[in-house]
Image: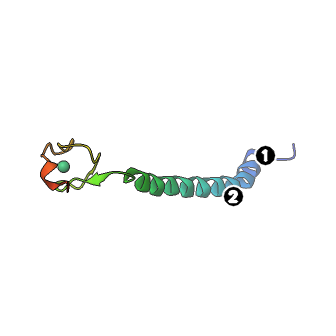
Amino acid sequence: MLFGTLEILLCLAPVMLVIFTIGVGLVAQNKALDRKEKWRGLIPCPHCQKALNPEAYICRFCRKELYEFIPN
Ligand SMILES: [Zn+2]
């Protein structure tokens, strides 16, 4: 027997750490991208600041009317 369980775990630990670090980095990057994507073509509600479709006339989050705030 060349490697015991402990040796295999010790060899895999740094590899797992690298994979974990890359995974966390990718998730963080995706979240940042999501945040950017979230606001593409959307407007913030003047009452609750959540992202809304610019064609909406009632906020779907706080149910307040928006039409008087949209410049037309
Ligand atoms: Zn709102």
The spot of residue 14 in percent (x, y) is 69, 58
Q: CA distance from mark 2 to mark 1?
A: 17 Å
Q: Which of the two residues, 1 or 53, is positioned nearer the viewer here?
A: 53
Local crowd size for mark 2, using a 10 Å CA cut-off: few (<14), some (14–19), many (≥20): few
Name the residue carrying label 1: 4
On residue 25, the disc is: none
Label 2 element class = helix
Label 1 element class = loop
Left or right: where 13 falls relative to 45? right
Local crowd size for mark 1, using a 10 Å CA cut-off: few (<14), some (14–19), many (≥20): few
| Residue at left offset 50%, top offset 52% | 30
Name the residue carrying label 2: 14
The spot of residue 52 in percent (x, y) is 27, 47
The spot of residue 20 in percent (x, y) is 60, 53
The spot of residue 38 in percent (x, y) is 38, 51
Label 1 sits on what residue type?
Answer: Gly
Q: Which quadrant is the N terminus positioned in?
A: top right
Q: Which of the two residues, 29 or 13, is positioned nearer the viewer here?
A: 29
The total of numbered circles placed on residues is 2
